Amino acid sequence: MTRSRGAMTAFGLTREEIRRQIQLPWSEAFRISWRYVTIRLGRSLVTASTIFLSVAFLMAVCTMILAAKATGHAQEDPQAFAATLARYKWSVLLGFMICATGIISALLMSVTERFREIGTMKCLGALDGFIVRMFLIEASLMGLFGSLAGAIVGALLMLIWAGVREGFSIWAKIPWGIKSLTGEWGFLGYFFASVLAGVVLSIISAIIPAYRAAKLQAADALRTEI
């Protein structure tokens, strides 16, 4: 009886069947990633701080937009408001670019520090896809915590600043839902979008380090001295 896919191995299985048997679940990748984040908490906090600052600034700008519309300042001089908003958008974009560079650098350093660990996992049967998932989950965890903290702090600082400047009665005029009555985005809409932007940025930034880690040869990784 012939096998339809892949060459037969010494154990009577095709290579595809062996790959399916040693495929580790997502839960195991999550467990290893969470363990690394908690053990190397200092390094994780440094990486998450760049996400925190970027998302905090983004959420502060979004809250400023809502406050300006609530007070009517956005309608008093639309051109000046649009020019100011354009400058803030460029600042947010620049901050996200710096944040992405920091995440890539931190994770590449993490890959270098974990050469032997990655080599050991590969010798025990971990596939390239598992290594990639592990680094992407790790980045998404740091991105989620950093983005949540940044969105909360950025919103609070801008709300307090608007309250001190215009009076805290302005809070009642801000649309707190996902969408306002006019169909524009509300506070929760901006909040979730800011958190999502931080998480997506973290995952995208982790692709290059994850790919590099996955392509390490087990023997070379085990011979590496850090």
Image (cartoon, rainbow, N blue to C red):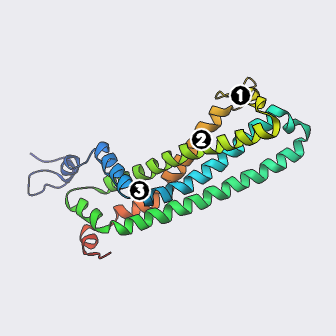
N-terminal of the pair, mark 1 or mark 3, is: 3
> What residue sits 74% from the left and 26% below the top?
172
Q: Is residue 13 left or right of residue 126?
A: left
Which quarter of the rendering shows the N terminus?
Answer: top left
Q: Nearer the viewer, residue 122 or 198?
A: 198
Give the image quarter of residue 126: bottom left
Which sits earlier in the primary sequence, circle 2 or circle 1? Answer: 2
Label 3 and label 2: CA atoms lie apart by: 21 Å
Q: Which amino acid is tagged 2?
A: Ile
Vertical placement of residue 55 versus 122, above or below: above
Question: The residue tagged with tag 2: helix, strand or loop?
Answer: helix
Q: Which amino acid does label 3 sit on?
A: Leu
At label 1, which amino acid type do we have?
A: Pro
Residue 130 position, x and y percent, is 31, 52
Q: Name the front one of labels 2 and 1.
A: 2
Crowding at dot 2, Cα within 10 Å, few <14 / some 14-19 / many 20+, comes out as some
As drawn, 171 above or below 96: above
Residue at the image position 64 percent from the left and 45 percent from the top = 154
**Mark 3 = which residue?**
41
Q: Which of 121 and 50 is in front in this view?
A: 50
Q: Which quarter of the figure is the C terminus placed in?
A: bottom left
Horizontal arrangement in the rendering, residue 152 relative to residue 162 (left or right): left
Alpha carbon distance from label 1 to label 3: 37 Å
Q: Where is residue 76 in the image (x, y as percent from the top left)?
A: 91, 38
Q: Which residue lies furthest to the right in this view?
A: 76
20 to 36, vertically: above or below: above
| Farthest-out residue, top | 181
Query: Badge 2 is on which residue?
Result: 152
Q: Which residue position is annotated with label 1?
A: 175
Q: Position of residue 188 (x, y in %)?
A: 62, 32
